[in-house]
């Protein structure tokens, strides 16, 4: 039996790291620590979170500089060995920059920053990230991004769909993402990238905890 140990990577410009910490440490109650981006490895963590924010100020393009941070080489190794990785918003962008997930996140369709609750549909509940949801269940999760428009080429899109890698779709696409895609997993099914923020929907005191089951599922999958 493994003990869940969550590591939350902090980049210059991360601003959702403490939200993620609160969700895992205070709500779910598991061993959680911050990992500064200059560290060389993820240590004894068996779950790694790349939080939202504006790593390196989103200069060049979102996630492009963070991809070269010291710790990311070990995150790539960690994921390659089956370690669980969740990239939220800017974290999703970083995962695409590293190649751990296919595709790219581009400017929103209307070229405006969007911050609001959105309705998602659970496309696949046979994953460590979504097994606590019902298939086709509608959930509400907030978004906050200016570059959340997911794009990939036609061959990649065909692979994503045929491999059941699309986990979440928008019911009312706010940013122009191809095929309404809001979150995808890798082929090995241990890495998830999503633009919506489940950590911001993990406490009923804030009026919504639809994201809590995703975080709980990750934790319980390593026990």
Image: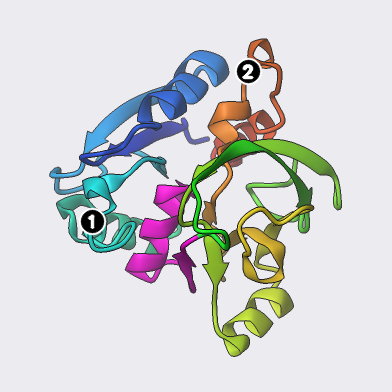
The answer to whether residue 116 is seen in the rendering is: yes
Give the crowd class for mark 1: few <14, some 14-19, many >=20 residues within 10 Å.
few
Vertical arrangement, residue 155 with respect to residue 114, above or below = below
Q: Which residue is mark 1?
A: 59
Give how far apart the Cα atoms at labels 1 and 2 are: 32 Å
Q: Which mark is residue 203?
A: 2
* Labels 1 & 2 near each other (Cβ < 8 A): no
The answer to whether residue 223 is seen in the rendering is: no
Q: Nearer the viewer, residue 208 or 166?
A: 208
Does the magenta segment cover residue 84?
yes
Task: Classify the position of the C terminus by image quarter.
Answer: top right
The percent position of residue 115, horizontal first and vertical second, equals 56, 38
Which label sits in the foreground, 1 or 2?
A: 1
In the image, what residue occupies the spot 21% across and 51% down? 71
Q: Is residue 198 left or right of residue 113?
A: right
Element type at mark 1? loop
What's drawn in magenta, residue-wise?
83-107
Give the crowd class for mark 2: few <14, some 14-19, many >=20 residues within 10 Å.
some
The percent position of residue 161, horizontal first and vertical second, equals 71, 75
Does the magenta segment cover residue 131?
no
Vertical arrangement, residue 82 with respect to residue 28, above or below = below
Picture quadrant of residue 183: bottom right
The percent position of residue 33, horizontal first and vertical second, equals 32, 26
Q: Earlier in the sequence, mark 1 or mark 2?
A: 1
Q: Nearer the viewer, residue 152 or 5?
A: 152
Colour setting: rainbow
In the image, what residue occupies the spot 46% across and 30% down? 3
């Amino acid at each position: 039996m493994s003990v869940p140990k969550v590591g939350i990577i902090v980049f210059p410009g991360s601003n959702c790291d403490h939200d993620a910490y609160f969700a895992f440490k205070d709500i779910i109650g598991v061993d959680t620590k911050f990992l500064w981006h200059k560290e060389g490895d993820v240590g004894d963590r068996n779950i790694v979170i790349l939080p939202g924010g504006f790593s390196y100020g989103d200069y060049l393009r979102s996630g492009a500089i963070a991809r070269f941070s010291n710790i990311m080489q070990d995150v790539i190794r960690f994921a390659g060995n089956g370690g669980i990785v969740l990239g939220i918003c800017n974290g999703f962008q970083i995962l695409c920059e590293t190649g751990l997930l296919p595709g790219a996140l581009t400017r929103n369709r209307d070229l405006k920053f969007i911050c609001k609750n959105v309705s998602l549909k659970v496309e696949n509940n046979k994953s460590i990230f979504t097994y606590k949801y019902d298939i086709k269940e509608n959930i509400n999760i907030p978004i906050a991004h200016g570059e959340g428009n997911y794009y990939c080429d036609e061959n990649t899109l065909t692979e994503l769909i045929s491999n059941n890698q699309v986990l979440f779709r928008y019911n009312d696409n706010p940013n122009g993402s191809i095929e309404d895609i809001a979150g995808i997993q890798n082929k090995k099914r241990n890495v998830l990238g999503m633009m919506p923020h489940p950590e911001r929907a993990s406490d009923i005191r804030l009026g919504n905890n639809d994201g809590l089951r995703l975080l709980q599922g990750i934790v319980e999958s390593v026990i």
